[in-house]
Image (spheres, rainbow, N blue to C red):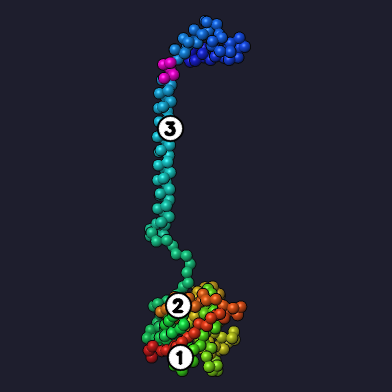
């Protein structure tokens, strides 16, 4: 430390004293003194150089350690995110339309109706505990009322509606048949009505979303009497067609034929 201080003092004089702007201009005794002090500093400077290298090496190791810890922490967080669903690596699905329960006694030994349309086929399974509604629908299918008719009202992310007789036939209305398990789940088929009690007759619609949980009064307004069990993707495709301001498809989606598969 004494040598360092002495050197600084000499250098200060050389730099700041107008008489000594360089070592060449300095008196001989100062030049010799500076030379001696420089020689005496050689070993300490080298030691300082090695000390600095060691310090740099330790800093490097420390930086590597910090990076490794950060990588480990990020990996742990990512792993917890993947297994956060009760240990499952499957991501949690976003809310999706509900479907009617598969284990439901109202569908035991029930009847199926097959629809052949211009945009693909689908099959509906009818409830067995709704003799009025199911009975009326089967009667109309057997009479060919739906053959050649169209889905005349389509609202994306809501429903597709059809059932107006192609020949303009008039159909009598039926009594509403609400059950304790009436739900307009995704894929269920329900009777359309005028908004008044007991006004359903031949028009029906298929829910393309879970309208039970979307609208509080939906299940107390529309009677669901079956569900699509095959070809729901075709029904959804129908729901995506272009429509006019009255929700009527710009190109007809036709029910080419409807038939009862079993009795």
Residue at the limit of the structure toward the front, as seen here:
24
* Sequence-wise first label, 2 or 3: 3
Q: Residue at x 40, y 31 (%)?
A: 57
- Tag 1 and tag 2, C-beta contact below 8 Å: no
| 241 relative to 49, above or below | below
Q: Secondary structure at mark 2?
A: helix
For disc 1, the neighbor class at 10 Å (few under 14, some 14 to 19, many from 20) is some
Magenta region: which residues?
A: 42-46
Q: Residue at x 40, y 77 (%)?
A: 102
Question: Circle 1 sits in a helix, a strand or a loop, which is it?
Answer: helix
Vertical position of residue 85 compared to residue 202: above or below: above
Between 83 and 66, the one nearer to me in the picture: 66
Q: Is residue 45 magenta?
A: yes
Instruction: Give how far across and how far down residue 165 sits, in percent.
Output: 52, 91
Determine the CA span between mark 1 and mark 2.
Answer: 20 Å
Q: Nearer the viewer, mark 2 or mark 3?
A: 2
Query: Residue 234 — which label?
Result: 2
Q: CA distance from mark 1 to mark 3?
A: 83 Å
| Image position, residue 36 (x, y; %) | 46, 9
| Residue 204 visible in image | no
Name which residue lies at 37% across and 86% down: 109
């Amino acid at each position: 430390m004494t040598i360092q201080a002495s050197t600084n003092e000499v250098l200060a004089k050389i730099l700041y004293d107008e008489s000594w702007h360089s070592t060449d201009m300095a008196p001989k005794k100062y030049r010799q003194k500076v030379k001696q002090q420089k020689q005496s500093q050689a070993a300490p400077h080298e030691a300082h150089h090695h000390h600095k290298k060691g310090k740099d090496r330790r800093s490097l190791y420390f930086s590597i350690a910090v990076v490794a810890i950060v990588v480990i922490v990020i990996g742990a967080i990512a792993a917890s995110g993947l297994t956060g669903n009760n240990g499952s690596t499957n991501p949690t699905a976003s809310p999706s339309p509900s479907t009617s329960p598969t284990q439901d006694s109202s569908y035991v030994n029930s009847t199926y109706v097959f629809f052949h349309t211009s945009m693909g086929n689908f099959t509906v399974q009818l409830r067995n505990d709704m003799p009025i509604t199911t009975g009326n629908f089967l009667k109309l299918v057997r009479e060919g009322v739906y053959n050649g008719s169209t889905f005349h009202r389509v609202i994306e992310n809501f429903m597709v509606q059809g059932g107006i007789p192609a020949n303009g036939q008039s159909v009598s209305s039926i009594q509403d048949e609400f059950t304790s398990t009436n739900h307009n789940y995704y894929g269920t088929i329900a009777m359309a009505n005028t908004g008044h009690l007991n006004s359903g007759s031949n028009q029906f619609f298929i829910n393309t979303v879970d309208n039970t949980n979307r609208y509080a009064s939906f299940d107390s307004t529309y009677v669901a009497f079956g569900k699509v069990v095959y070809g729901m993707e075709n029904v959804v495709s129908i729901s995506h067609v272009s429509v006019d301001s009255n929700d009527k498809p710009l190109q007809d989606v036709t029910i080419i034929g409807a038939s009862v598969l079993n009795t």
